[in-house]
Image (spheres, rainbow, N blue to C red):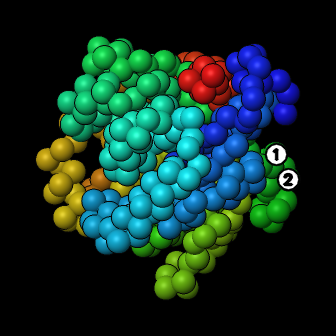
Amino acid sequence: MGGALNGTPATRARRLLVVAGEPSGDAHAARVVRRLQALGPVEVHAVAGPELRAAGATMIVPQEELAVIGFSGVIAKLPVILRARRAILDDVARFQPDAALLVDYPGFNLRLGPELKRLGVKVFYYIAPQVWAWHAERAAQMAAWVDRLAVVFPFEERIFRDAGVAAHFVGHPLLDDLAPELDEATFRAELGVPAEARLVGLLPGSRAGEMRAHARTLLEVGQRLRARFPDVVPVLALARNLTTEGLPAHLFEGVKVVKGRTHSVQAHAACCAVASGTATLETALLGSPLAIVYRVGWINHAIARRVVKLSHIGLPNIVAGREVAPEFIQGEFRADALADTLGGWLADPAALAQRREALREVRTRLGGGGASERTAQLLAEVLA
């Protein structure tokens, strides 16, 4: 695996604990681990999903057990979360890691981090908790236990540095290798869709709760657009762990359902409707005009309204500092309203072009690739 970390002799492999509680964090962490391995021997124990397991991490807890949605989702999973926390701390006592890499997942990691610090473990946090959206005072609290913080949005570095945290803007990891799985011609051939058809991407989210909250309305939007534009083909992009079970069969008329092709849908669609989250940023970076949707239970929404301090929830809008993608949240997420917006774009090529141009601002603000490499270099310094 190359020389010792940070270019210095080592008597043993460095020991790293990784905690990534969601699929996107698992993927981002695995990229960092692979680049870290290229710098020298490192032994990794992790809350691991498939990507970290493929990178050679020894699994403490399956990442899949910890994935939750919303505030009430945390409550429902509390016994699992507490068992995972105990398993991690027990493993720390045996493994004696030199440092911990905590990746996003603030509801869990903001509580675990201080405990690790008290146990003498250096804490490296990657993909900062969005304290600029809620509980800004937590940035100052993190200064007491975070040894290094790698942030993925440029405006975050100042926020955390002002709070006393050793923060470094590394760029966004999506820019490292974001690309469609297939070129457009191959993708259309796989779908059985002619070149002249216009694809409309429907992305309900990667969790089962998001699927339940969004899929039916998105499929209704697809049927409305098919009725208005005979050349439109809706494409429902599903995470590999999701199914369409329980959804009415008539909503799938003329709809293509795909798995493992999300980036192709995002890149090759004329426009998309996307559940709020990382997928909205992916869609924006791939250049497809998008509307952002989200719906949660009333308890989660009531809590969020009290704690979230942003005018927008969509990452493309937050990064751009203005609305580059309209948002349909809670009661505003209706099939008629969303179909009217997407239909207006499809009826007006100039409007679609204008939307694509606005999305360029998102990529410009995020800078270039290399986030995983820069993060691995910073982490190697902490491990040295």
Q: Nearer the viewer, residue 75 or 299?
A: 75
Secondary structure found at label 2: helix
Query: Label for residue 231?
Result: none
Q: Residues within 10 Å of mark 2 (few under 14, many from 20)?
A: few
Secondary structure found at label 1: loop
- Asked if labels 2 and 1 touch by Cβ distance under 8 angstroms, the answer is yes
**Residue at image point 80% right, 65% down:** 192
Direction from residue 359 to residue 105 in the image, left or right: left
Q: Nearer the viewer, residue 146 or 215?
A: 146
- Which three-letter amino acid code belongs to the residue tagged 1? Asp
Q: Quadrant of the C terminus?
A: top right
Residue 137 x %, y %: 20, 30
Residue for badge 2:
186
CA distance for labels 1 and 2:
5 Å
Q: Quadrant of the N terminus?
A: top right
Compared to residue 221, the image places residue 33 above or below, namely above
- Which three-letter amino acid code belongs to the residue tagged 2? Thr
Q: Nearer the viewer, residue 177 or 185?
A: 177
Direction from residue 122 to residue 307 in the image, left or right: left
Residue for badge 1:
183
